[in-house]
Amino acid sequence: MNKNRSPIIIGNDHAAYYLKGKIKEFILKRGIEVEDAGTDSDKSVDYPDFGIKVASMVSAGTYERGILLCGTGLGMSMVANKFANVRAALCGDMFSAIMSRRHNDSNILVMGARVIGESLAMEIVRVWLETPFEGGRHLARIEKFNNL
């Protein structure tokens, strides 16, 4: 299966509940399966619980890629990057999303629902899914921090 067609796991807190629904719909229309790790409402929750669910599944290799959403994206990215083999990239623009894939082989995309609009979020997801990792010299750099 092509990497950009592999199932994606997605998680969010209450602040990003609405945006998650839109992103799931967008991904499903592209023919990619989506596993929803929650939350399932806009009722206040603790974002680490959902960041842990997604990052642990990516870390274990159960999913090649994941998406995490919260109000700013900051908390989710901090949680996710605590896990081995996770390279979570907080992206608020398309260039960062592209480069996170090309040079860093990011495997979790993180976005802040209170920071970016829906249209930009969809474009960020699109380019993140479509952009391949370049490998080469970038692989050696990733191996340096994967071994920490």
Image (cartoon, helix red, strand yellow):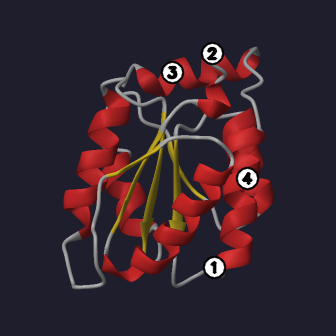
Check disc 3 and give the amino acid type. Answer: Lys
Q: Report the residue marked by disc 1.
A: 116
**Foreground of the two, 13 or 81:** 13
Q: Report the residue marked by disc 2.
A: 140
Q: Report the residue marked by disc 4.
A: 126
Q: Evaluate whether residue 104 shows in this view.
A: yes
Q: Are marks 1 and 4 in contact (CB under 8 Å)?
A: no
Q: Earlier in the sequence, mark 1 or mark 4?
A: 1
User: In which quadrant will I find the N terminus?
Assistant: top right
Residue 103 picture location, percent across and down? 72, 33
Check disc 1 and give the amino acid type. Answer: Ile
Q: What is the secondary structure assignment of the residue under circle 2? A: helix
**Dot label at residue 81:** none
Q: Nearer the viewer, mark 3 or mark 1?
A: 1
Q: Nearer the viewer, mark 2 or mark 4?
A: 4
- Residue at 66 percent across and 33 percent down: it is 4
What is the CA distance from the residue labelled 2 to the residue labelled 4? 27 Å
Q: Report the residue marked by disc 3.
A: 144
Q: Are marks 3 and 1 in contact (CB under 8 Å)?
A: no
